[in-house]
């Protein structure tokens, strides 16, 4: 009985993209400056990053802004665009599932999972 209630709650309070993909996506950054770079990703600072650097970024409809700063280099800003996450299609006839995926941001994903940052002196 408890298992049946839990299954119903799980099916009605979650959605496919949220379950399978989560609300964050793994992205790797590389840079022509290999160390001593500070990255700010959506306001979260990562100090003295060594490349390649892999982290998770939020899914959602807003673009992710990445700022790279290093001594003797001009700051570089990178915008991570978002695209449709095809896993959401599994919710084909489930309006609630679409709504949950949209609210959690799981309906989108970063356009790429690898980004190259080119810093200039």
Image (cartoon, rainbow, N blue to C red):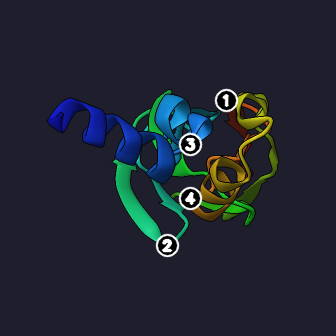
Residue nearer the viewer, 90 or 9: 9
Return the x and y of residue 112 as percentages of the image width and height: 75, 32
Q: Quadrant of the N terminus?
A: top left
Secondary structure under badge 4? helix
Which of the two discs, 4 and 1, labels the residue nearer the N terminus?
4
- The residue drawn where x is 67% and y is 29% is 113
Residue beneath disc 3? 15
**Mark drawn on residue 113:** 1
- Gap in angstroms between the C-alphas marked 1 and 3: 23 Å
Residue nearer the viewer, 7 or 114: 7
**Mark drawn on residue 104:** 4
Q: Tags 4 and 1 in contact by the CB under 8 Å rule?
A: no
Which of the two discs, 1 and 3, labels the residue nearer the N terminus?
3
Mark nearer the viewer, 3 or 2: 3
**Mark drawn on residue 5:** none
Q: Tags 3 and 2 in contact by the CB under 8 Å rule?
A: no
Q: Quadrant of residue 89?
A: top right
Residue 63 vertical placement versus 36 (above, below): below
**Mark drawn on residue 43:** 2
Tell me, yes or no, if residue 43 can be seen here.
Answer: yes
- Gap in angstroms between the C-alphas marked 3 and 2: 28 Å
Which of the two discs, 4 and 3, labels the residue nearer the N terminus?
3
Q: Quadrant of residue 78?
A: bottom right
Q: Quadrant of the C terminus?
A: bottom right
Return the x and y of residue 80 as percentages of the image width and height: 74, 51
Q: Tags 4 and 3 in contact by the CB under 8 Å rule?
A: yes
Which of the two discs, 2 and 4, labels the residue nearer the N terminus?
2
Secondary structure under badge 2? loop
Classify 10 Å Cα crowding around label 1: few (below 14), some (14-19), many (20 and above).
some
Mark nearer the viewer, 2 or 4: 4
- Gap in angstroms between the C-alphas marked 2 and 4: 19 Å
């Amino acid at each position: 009985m408890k298992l049946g209630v839990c299954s119903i709650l799980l099916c009605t309070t979650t959605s496919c993209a949220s379950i399978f993909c989560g609300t964050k996506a793994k992205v790797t950054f590389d840079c022509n400056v290999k160390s001593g770079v500070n990255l700010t990703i959506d306001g979260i600072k990562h100090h003295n990053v060594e490349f390649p650097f892999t982290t998770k970024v939020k899914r959602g409809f807003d673009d992710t802004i990445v700022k790279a700063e290093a001594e003797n280099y001009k700051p570089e800003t990178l915008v991570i665009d978002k695209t449709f996450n095809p896993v959401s299609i599994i919710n084909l006839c489930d309006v609630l599932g679409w709504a949950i995926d949209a609210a959690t941001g799981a309906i989108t994903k970063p356009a790429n999972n690898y980004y190259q940052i080119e810093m200039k002196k």
